[in-house]
Amino acid sequence: MAEAPGDPKSVKQDDKGKYVDGKGDPTFNVKPDGTVDWYSYSGYRRYTSECSVCHGPDGEGSTYAPALKNSLKTINYPEFYGIVVGGRQNLGGGENKVMPALGDNKNVMCYIDDIYVYLRSRSNEAVPRGRPPAHDEKPPQASEAEKACLGE
Ligand code: HEC
């Protein structure tokens, strides 16, 4: 078993305006009035369009796929990344459940950190269910990185 994600407390912002924890992994930042950082908000939107069909709204899980807000209590950033890129199949017990490999899907991979940050915030109960009521503005560096990733 790999180590758990660890303390989600943000220690600084990286060169893309993304908050990172003491290990340098992406994390959320929620102000006392509930305003969430840009990446958490963006992650909410991307999660809702790319993952919730199987994993249920707000990371709450479904009868088909696990609640990722719980998964992220034990799955750390590199593991999360690997599962999303390569997919996973539960071959035990004759179950036929498949996590698709999404490594070629730009609508996922260009926002993988956003999705991770959002789910991490959910796993720490830092943001409520549903659309975050208020969010920081999009950092200009996030727009540039997005364009480069999407090949625009
Ligand atoms: C077509 C349905 C489907 C979609 C879409 C999907 N998943 Fe999954 N995912 C699954 C299933 C089913 C599993 C459980 C696989 C297993 O049992 O091994 C899973 C497992 C996972 C796991 C491991 C969870 C754990 O507790 O072990 C992660 C992380 C994950 N998915 C992330 C994502 C993310 C992020 C997205 C959106 C970018 C996504 N998935 C989209 C079906 C899906």
Image (spheres, grey):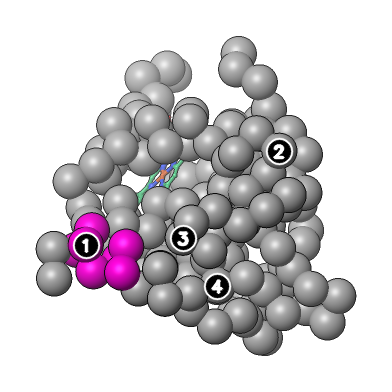
Q: Nearer the viewer, mark 3 or mark 4?
A: 3
Q: Position of residue 71 (x, y in %)?
A: 61, 39
What type is the residue that disc 2 sits on?
Gly
Asked if disc 4 is less than 8 Å from ligand 1, the answer is no
- 39 to 85, vertically: above or below: below
Q: Residue at x 40, y 52 (%)?
A: 112
Provide the secondary structure element on which disc 3 rests.
loop
Between discs 2 and 3, the one toward the N terminus? 3
Provide the secondary structure element on which disc 1 rests.
helix
In the rendered image, which residue does mark 4 sit on? Answer: 38
Pointer 2 local density, CA inside 10 Å: few below 14, some 14–19, many at least 20: some
In the rendered image, which residue does mark 1 sit on? Answer: 148
Between discs 3 and 4, the one toward the N terminus? 3
- 3 to 29, vertically: above or below: above
Between discs 3 and 1, the one toward the N terminus? 3
Magenta span: chief secondary structure: helix
Q: Nearer the viewer, residue 149 or 56?
A: 149
What type is the residue that disc 1 sits on?
Ala
* Distance Cα–Cα, label 3 vs label 4: 11 Å
Provide the secondary structure element on which disc 2 rests.
loop
Circles 2, 3 touching at the beta carbon (< 8 Å) = no
* Observer able to see residue 128: yes
* Distance Cα–Cα, label 2 vs label 4: 20 Å
* Distance Cα–Cα, label 1 vs label 2: 27 Å
Is 106 left, or right, of 123 in this rendering? left
